[in-house]
Image (spheres, grey):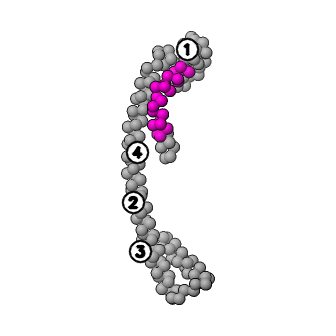
Amino acid sequence: MVLDADDAEDIVQQAFVSLWQKINDNNVIRISARAYLYKVVYNASLDFLKHKKVRKKYEEERLINDHGITHANRITENELQKRIQDSIAQLPDQCGRIFRMNRFENLKYREIAAELNIAEKTVENQMGKALKMLKKSLKQYLPLLLTIIYLYNER
């Protein structure tokens, strides 16, 4: 019935365990062991097939939903990425340049200061200013960003 030898063996084994438990109880089985086992195996097989059908339906729905979420995430990520780029572009020239050098070129404050011939403290102040401006500019996207991060961590 279940079309899988391992699953069938598990069902039959569970039926024998059930029979053994019933024999040791005060409720002695009043029908033949053979009839009891047949009925238990038959019902367990039907339950197994129902469960398998429900699980398959759930997996299909999950695949459909995951595909929809992935597509929506891509659209959302693209919008967010564009908004981040626009916000960085709106930074004052020196502030934006220092931010890009630090975040995209991975330069340390000391290296940026040496390259631009400015004090390291100026670099630090400009980075603070850039981060504050970006935070203000992107504040409305924080829940969206947190959702995207959460969904990626779930995978």
Q: Position of residue 126 (x, y in %)?
A: 54, 17
In the displayed structure, 38 sits above or below 2; it is: below
Mark 1 or 2: the one toward you:
2
Circle 3 crowding by C-alpha within 10 Å: few under 14, some 14–19, many from 20: few
The disc, 2 or 4, on the residue closer to the chain's N-terminal end is: 2
Q: Is residue 26 magenta?
A: no
Q: Is residue 20 visible?
A: no
Kind of residue sitting beneath label 1: Glu
Q: CA distance from mark 3 to mark 1?
A: 76 Å
**Secondary structure predominantly adopted by residues drawn in magenta:** helix
Residue, disc 2: 57
The numbered mark, 4 or 1, whose residue comes first in the sequence reads 4
Which image quarter holds the N terminus? Answer: bottom left
Mark 4 highlights which residue?
A: 69
Q: Amino acid at mark 2?
A: Lys
Query: What amino acid is labelled 3 in the image?
Result: Met
What residue is drawn where x is 54% and y is 75%? Answer: 14
Measured Cα–Cα span from mark 4 to mark 1:
44 Å
Q: In terms of sequence position, does the residue under pointer 2 or pointer 3 come before the other?
A: 3
At horizontal 41% and vertical 61% (from top left) the residue drawn is 56
Task: Identify residue for label 3.
Answer: 1
Q: Residue 24 in the image: x percent, y percent?
A: 62, 82
- Do the residues bearing badges 3 and 4 touch, measured as CB atoms within 8 Å? no
Q: Write the start and end of the magenta stretch as one range.
A: 127-148
Mark 4, Cα crowd under 10 Å, few <14 / some 14-19 / many 20+, is few
**Spatial separation of the CA atoms under disc 1 and disc 2:** 61 Å
Q: Earlier in the sequence, mark 1 or mark 2?
A: 2
At x 51%, y 76%, the residue is 12
In the rendered structure, the answer to whether residue 95 lies left or right of residue 121 reads: left
